[in-house]
Image: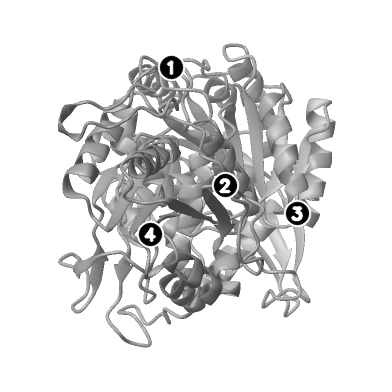
């Protein structure tokens, strides 16, 4: 990698802008602009602590190792400690460092004391730091040490982890903190991160301050990352609660938080019809992408090992090829992930661990099939698909059409900081902040509040919409329909403007009500009214996601504009007028 020039006088490392061995179109052989600017700022200010926030795929590893190599060359430090979230990422850091002749030991155990003199540094996990922070503190005190805290938001996962990181690395000569995802809002400060009064939040709150930030929107404009198409699927579901009540609802429709969680679990049940339909659609999309990018691959992120195995069986039936299955954060898993990255296999199914930091550049299609839905986890998961290798690549991520996930998708380009709430047991909306960490924990069936009696009964999937570049395109369509195929068949190599243009064309075609041949018999009057109400409710839900206006207000506005009685007793003509009106709003109104 060419060195940054200018006043900093940085030494080259030989790493590409993004490890391993690839660079965005037109950038090979040189530091990226953001890396150059961040490095020059770092070596101009010579700070003890430096927080870099850069979107996944931007090249944080190469940036950090360039800093490390230059600090070693200038004798500012003589040892390196890398802390990463997982065992797999430890190995990945060591491999990257080896390419620039920095020997880092990923097998170091905190109880072994010394490392071999052949190593200039060690790599370990946050959990290992928490296991014996005092031993690491002694090691750090004994040398001029640079500590690289990768995905540093994990130091706020638990109070004990944050305390351990602070105890172990407080004596460090330099600390370089990296993250590529938005921080959560909670009451756990992240060690060594600077906080300032939060002018946008509640009184008494604090907001983290990055020393250098490079977000998804900037990286997309620079051609470093791919644009992401979010393919949202809704559907009719039914389940039995732990109390024995049978519930029927539409995925993404208005309901309580508990019922919404149960609806999502029903959709993700591998024994229903929703997941097979979505996996089939995702495989169809992958086939289209591979027509332009032959080695493109797909990833299904599952909630737990049991459903991951079931999803793998479904994909085997759908694609005719057995997917790679990754179930745990162990050395064997790292080898399977690396083998998949180097192969031409179509699909990998994994449980959470590949959602952060794992580098498989050919991943182009994803299925978000996990009940974990925090903004932090969602951004980590989507980050696996945005790493561009050539100009025009796009990513497609299939998601359940539920409000909070659609909001995360629409806000991909928004940059967030870590917000510390004012000291209190509960925040302004009455929710206990101490439960946030618990909400991110993967629950076993026994842990779930309704685990004993809950049962998914039936599920059907239908295409809902595409979320792209903060906007929504498309309208409800049956899975397997020509309307759905219009979106699944988008070419695999397109510029962002071309993607948006095609999406608009498909939506215009749908909004004009193009008649397509069908072998389905004419519905009865009752079936026709039920279908129209379902279509109207889906469009109202979409307008709610776009405007945040309550469903009842939207229905009232439609009645005011079109006349007629409430939806429950409206005629087919009334419903069709309201459907046409809200479609017109979607095309011509901004909000």
Dot 2 corresponds to which residue? 119
- The circle on residue 392 is 1
Q: Position of residue 186 (x, y in %)?
A: 38, 72
Q: How far apart are marks 3 and 2 (CA)?
A: 57 Å
Q: Distance between the residues labelled 3 and 4?
A: 37 Å
Q: Nearer the viewer, mark 2 or mark 1?
A: 2
Q: Which residue lies furthest to the top in this view?
A: 292
Q: Quadrant of residue 367?
A: top right
If you read the primary sequence from the N terminus, does the residue marked by circle 1 or circle 3 appear first? 1
Q: Position of residue 554 (x, y in %)?
A: 33, 54
Local SS, label 1: loop
Mark 2 vs mark 4: in front? 2
Say the numbered circle drawn on residue 183. 4
Label 3 sits on a secondary structure element that is: strand
The residue at the point 52 percent across, 15 percent down is: 491
Task: Decide: is 520 above or below 546.
Answer: above
**Real-space Cα separation, disc 4 to disc 1, in angstroms:** 30 Å
Q: Point out residue 12 in the picture as x, y percentages from the top left corner.
A: 35, 27
Lower position in the chain sequence, tag 2 or tag 1: 2
Q: Earlier in the sequence, mark 3 or mark 2?
A: 2
Query: Residue 544: in sight, yes or no?
Result: yes
Question: Quick check: 546 left or right of 510?
Answer: left
- 45 up-or-down from 294: above or below: below
Say which residue label 3 marks.
Answer: 458
Real-space Cα distance between discs 2 and 1?
41 Å
Nearer the observer, 246 or 525: 246
Instruction: Tell me the distance, in whole angstroms, between the alpha carbons under discs 1 and 3.
Output: 39 Å
Residue 352 is at least partly visible in this image: no
* Number of marks: 4
């Amino acid at each position: 990698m060419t060195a940054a020039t200018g006043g900093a006088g940085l030494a080259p490392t030989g790493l590409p802008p993004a490890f391993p061995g690839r660079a965005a179109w037109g950038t090979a052989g040189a530091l990226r602009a953001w890396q150059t600017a961040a490095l020059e700022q770092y070596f101009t200010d010579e700070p003890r602590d430096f927080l870099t926030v850069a979107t996944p795929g931007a090249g944080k590893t190469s940036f950090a190792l360039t800093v490390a190599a230059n600090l070693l060359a200038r004798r500012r430090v003589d040892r390196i400690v890398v802390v990463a979230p997982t065992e797999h990422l430890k190995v990945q850091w060591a491999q990257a460092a080896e390419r620039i002749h920095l020997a880092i030991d990923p097998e170091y155990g905190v109880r072994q004391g010394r490392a071999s003199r052949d190593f200039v540094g060690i790599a370990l996990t946050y959990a290992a730091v928490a296991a014996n922070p005092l031993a690491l503190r002694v090691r750090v005190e004994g040398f001029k040490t640079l500590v690289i805290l990768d995905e540093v938001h994990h130091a706020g996962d638990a109070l004990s982890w944050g305390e351990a990181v602070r105890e172990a690395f407080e004596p460090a000569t330099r600390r370089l903190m990296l993250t590529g995802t938005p921080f959560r809002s909670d009451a756990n400060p992240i060690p060594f991160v600077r906080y300032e009064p939060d002018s946008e939040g509640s009184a008494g709150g604090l907001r983290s301050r990055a020393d250098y930030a490079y977000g998804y929107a900037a990286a997309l404009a620079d051609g470093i990352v791919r644009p992401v198409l979010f393919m949202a699927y809704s559907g009719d579901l039914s389940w039995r609660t732990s109390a024995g009540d049978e519930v029927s609802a539409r995925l993404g429709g208005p309901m309580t938080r508990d019922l919404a969680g149960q609806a999502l679990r029903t959709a993700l049940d591998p024994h229903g019809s929703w997941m097979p339909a979505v996996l089939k659609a995702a495989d169809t999309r992958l086939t289209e992408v591979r027509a332009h990018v032959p080695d493109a691959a797909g990833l299904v992120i599952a909630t737990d090992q049991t459903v991951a195995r079931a999803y793998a069986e479904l994909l085997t039936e759908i694609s005719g090829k057995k997917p790679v299955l990754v179930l745990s954060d162990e050395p064997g898993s790292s080898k399977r992930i690396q083998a998949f990255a180097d192969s031409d296999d179509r699909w990998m199914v994994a449980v959470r661990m590949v959602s952060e930091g794992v580098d498989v550049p050919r991943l182009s299609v994803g299925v978000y099939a996990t009940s974990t839905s925090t903004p932090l986890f969602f951004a980590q998961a989507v980050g696996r698909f945005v790493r561009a290798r050539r100009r025009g690549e796009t990513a497609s991520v299939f998601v359940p059409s539920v409000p909070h996930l659609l909001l995360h998708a629409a806000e991909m380009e928004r940059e967030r900081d870590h917000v510390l709430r004012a000291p209190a047991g509960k925040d302004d909306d009455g929710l206990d902040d101490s439960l946030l960490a618990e909400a991110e924990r993967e629950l076993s069936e026994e842990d779930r509040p309704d685990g004993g009696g809950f049962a998914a009964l039936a599920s059907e999937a239908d295409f809902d919409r595409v979320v792209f570049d903060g906007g929504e395109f498309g309208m409800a369509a049956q899975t397997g329909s020509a309307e759905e195929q219009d979106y699944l068949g988008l070419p695999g190599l397109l510029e962002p403007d071309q993607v948006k243009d095609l999406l608009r064309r498909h939506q215009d075609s749908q909004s004009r009500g193009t008649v397509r041949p069908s072998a389905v018999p004419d519905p009865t009057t009752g079936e026709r009214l039920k279908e129209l109400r379902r279509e109207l409710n889906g469009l109202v839900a979409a307008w709610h996601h776009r405007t945040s206006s309550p469903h009842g207000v939207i229905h009232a506005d439609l009645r005011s504009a079109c006349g007629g009685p409430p939806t429950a007793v409206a005629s087919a003509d009334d419903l069709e007028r309201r459907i046409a009106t809200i479609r017109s709003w979607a095309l011509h109104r901004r909000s």
